[in-house]
Image (cartoon, rainbow, N blue to C red):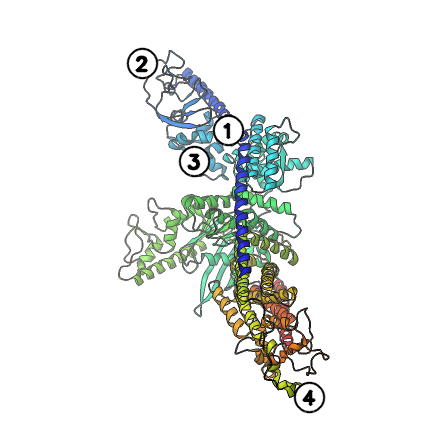
Amino acid sequence: MIALACFLVLVYIIFLWFHWYTKRKARLQAIEERFLSADREKAIKKRERVRLGRIRPRLEKISERIEAEIENQRETGEKRFDDYELEAVGPDENGENGWSGRGTSRVINKDSHVRFQVEDGEANDDEDQNGEGSPYGIHSRRKFLGFDLDGQIWFDADILFDILDADGSEDLSYEELNTFMMLDSVELLHFIRTMNELGGIYTDEEDEADMHSQLVPRHVFVENFVEALEVASNFSCTKVEAETLFDELVAAQAKADLEDGHRSSRRRSHSSSSSRMSRRGSSVIPKLKLSDLFNSECSNYLTEAEINALAKRIRNQKRRRGSVTTALSHVAVTKEEFVKYYPKMLEDVTGRGGNLKDFKAKSNIGDGFDLSFTKLCLTVKVGGKSVNTVNNLTGRLQAKTMTAVMGGSGSGKTSLLNALSGRGSYGELSGTIRVNGIQSALATHKNEVGYVPQDDIVYHELTVKENLMYSGRFQLQAGIKRHEIEDLADEVLANLGLTKVKDAIVGDVGKRGISGGERKRVNIGVELMRKPQILFLDEPTSGLDSSSAMLLTKCLRSLVSSSGITVCAVIHQPRKYIFDLFHSLILLADGGNMVYAGPTSEAEAYFTKMSYVLPSGEGVADWLIDVSSGRLRPVRRGGMRSALAQSYYQKGAVAGFRKGRRVEASNTMEKSLERAKLARQHLSRAWIEHFDGLSHHDKEQFLPPKRFGLPNSRKRPGFLRQVVVQTRRSFLIIRRNWIIKFIDTLLIVGAVALISGLEGVYDITRDVNPTMVPYEVLVSDDKEDLIPFFPQLFAFAISASASMQEYALKVGVITAVLVGLAASRVITGYRLQFYREASSGYDPFAYFVSVNFTSSIEHGFQILLCSVVGYWLRGSAAPLYAYFVNFLLLGWLAVSWSFLLSVVTPTSSTTVVIGFFMAFFGLLYSGGLAPATYVEIYDPAKKALAAFCGLVSPTRYFIEMSAVNEHRTLPPQSGFTFIESEAFGLPEDSTSFDFLSLAQNDEYDVVERSSRGWYWSALPAVIVGLAIRCICGIILAFESRQIIIPLRKACARQMEKSFCRQFDVFENVFFWLFVAFAAAGYLIGVSIWLILRK
């Protein structure tokens, strides 16, 4: 009890220290944050003045251009601008700002704050109707712009709209804006895009023709003019503005350094901030990390992908001058370098330098990945029957395009994705698949195919960037350098809009992290790190709100245009803008039948020709799903029906349908379902007829293209490299889960300490006198006469063995249960991640070797603490290292069985199964209790029982080793050890070990007195654990389908060349499978031999 109290006091002291450290850390951070606040505020105020300075010259140029146009038209006699006037407006006689004009007026003050106000357009009585009088008075003519004496800018965007709207259509076109806005083509396109996006109108950024044809409504222009003009004004940058931006970013960087929580980081921040505050008097030159551009005002007018490209170009300029080979996030520039490179690189990235298209073209991946399929079928067994989940489909995923797969529930959307991506091993695949026009199996291009599952299967303990970095280390070519992987990760983060959360923990339901939409994008980024040429996504927008879904889809569209990736995604109920972002559509009906394939822009027209009518206000995508499900009927138009509708009515497929409504049951639900089924069949037949009737030119979009080069294959990191990377990631996850690991350790060690404290110090011997042994027997020359009285003669030593075995049984079972449950999380907690990585080509054996290594260290540390605590509280006579080895073997077997049971049982049942197994077999088959006592185990007639106990019981060796280690330290007078000169002449095979049936397979060596421990059971325990883990690894390989898929494909009938390739894979897999099974069988055989050996 004293020891237990000391242990609790130690825990309390640790808690107090942690509490003190946390408060001290917060106090120091607050002091140093105040230290930098003044410098940061100065930088922000300077930036506000620069921002105001950017808008004012733009407005002045616009006003000058309009004034010139007004004078020009007045000279020509036109009267359109007779009601408009441009003049400075200032404070009135009451000291208030005077302003006149209808609509919404805005005030921009020196601090760049914008406020709205609506005032009457009445004239001041003190002025004449011609606007003469004081230059700061109120005029009757309509004015849209003015500057007061305080430096404020006054303007009326509503009046400005009327000036720009030449045709009076209440919409501004590109040409009308280009007349007066005084912006170059790039700035004007960004101005239109920003204004429409702020107003909820989205355009295709990659389609320049679409941008030129986009109109800006009045309400959008009036509400968002200032913000859009500010964004467009930032595409040109002077040296003064670059200097101001640098100063602001340096101050922000110093503040961020203070928030990282590390003392060394705080010291660096303190010293660097001091140098920033007194740059002239210090020799320290302030530097800016290029990664800080993402958190600057650049993010207000540049996308993250453009900022990443800008930062890379600045780094490349530095690289030309010196040896800069580090990743982008570690590159820092001086103020001189930033001012020199930033303006020019900004022009290049935004397109003002004329190099934007060339820049994007360089990032494209070859000619792309074109995937075509003909008569594709996927057949699965359901209830003993063969069912086609994909039924005779023909289509094409054109290179560098986005294809949407849509349909109702059960239409085979995911099955089609699995069939095309090579993940349809659960069924029989038939048909022809061509890659870039060449018939080829997707298994040979596994590195070029990315698959994003519906669930967000990532490591929630890692940050966003760490997930991407580890994915790149596994999936990129062997030998790639770290900074190249980090550059790719930064690029992926920028393309997906995740740069600002790159250092945030992903999190999950139990631990708060990033948002759901961001987690979806991380899920996609993990696959993009393999640099795929075609990307399949299973319902990427499911569970997201419309805004997050739109952002995700725009990211995918940007990847298509910038990286040349072919995208195929299953989507549900997309909004119109999301639907329009896709180039083509594959629409499926129940049973995997195709009802439409082609451009998304032509889908509505196709079904309209079949007499389907899109209801007013309903989205096209929802309507198409309703049509494909058979819940809508064709309608009459002017008494005429289409051929499809006529066939419906002739066959009675739509009898009882109400015009313009969804399918309703006329008599029973069965009839309604039957009608919907017939409707879907007619749609499928109609598409086949339509496809067969297409001209050769129209069929080209569905047929394979002319042959061009296949994607180049790359060599992935080898087995040992994957083991190292897996191990690093596992240790990082353990460190992030330190609270859980601490609680586990506390429970395990606490249980051992509690049991040991309650049991007290070992009773190796007890005070028992041999009163029942006759004196004549003790002095007899024939020592055989002593054997019948052996228990009475050595009762003082033998009677203590029961308490030793009882203690070992308690500690062994409790420790095995707790360690086994803690170890099971390694498998059950990351099972989905393992399946995803294995299906992507990760080596499952490398993963398992890493798990074994990290778990051995983790649980070895826990076992070490248990052995130290137990050794100290029990006062063992055996050495500490023997005590530790005994506990270590117990943990080894417990973890081995935990791994195996976690693999073969469902996740929901793992805890119950492991707890039952450890308790049941640890108690009843350990040798300490019936029906498998040590007498039964060492019975020569029951060798099968001995082998069974040695293989399945985690405590079989622990209990025996605990008792034997203590008994071997006793002198020969105890009857356990045997030295002929001191053992009263007893026979060597008659000892207390024989009476207790302990160590009967080592009966000659065990009787030697020693305080170094007894290790006969160590080798059988190690081999048994290895055999169990080997079996576990084989099962994991089967579950990951790394073995099943090649075996099935090797036996499938394919063309001769492909078959030869598959046969090579089959031979390799079969060889390693044979080696694994042979190793497992050999280890089991060796284990049995070691258990039974004498």
Mark 3 and mark 1 lie on one chain; the one further toward the N terminus is 3
The image shows residue 908, relative to residue 74, as above or below, that is below
Mark 4 and mark 2 lie on one chain; the one further toward the N terminus is 2
Which one is closest to the eye, mark 2 or mark 1? Answer: 2
Location of the C terminus by quadrant is: bottom right
Secondary structure found at label 3: helix
- Residue labelled with disc 1: 233
User: Which residue type carries mark 2?
Assistant: Asp
Q: Quadrant of residue 752?
A: bottom right
For the residues marked 3 and 1, what is the alpha-carbon distance in whole angstroms? 16 Å
User: Which residue type carries mark 3?
Assistant: Leu
Q: Residue at x 63, y 53 (%)?
A: 714
Question: Residue 793, how many percent across, how many down?
Answer: 62, 81
The image shows residue 480, relative to residue 208, as above or below, that is below
- Residue labelled with disc 2: 125
Q: Are marks 3 and 1 in contact (CB under 8 Å)?
A: no
Q: Are marks 4 and 2 in contact (CB under 8 Å)?
A: no
Question: Residue 499, how many percent across, how many down?
Answer: 54, 42
Label 4 CA crowd tier, 10 Å (few <14, some 14–19, many 20+) = few
- Residue labelled with disc 3: 198
For the residues marked 2 and 1, what is the alpha-carbon distance in whole angstroms? 39 Å
Mark 4 and mark 1 lie on one chain; the one further toward the N terminus is 1
The answer to whether residue 46 shows anywhere in this view is yes
Mark 4 and mark 3 lie on one chain; the one further toward the N terminus is 3
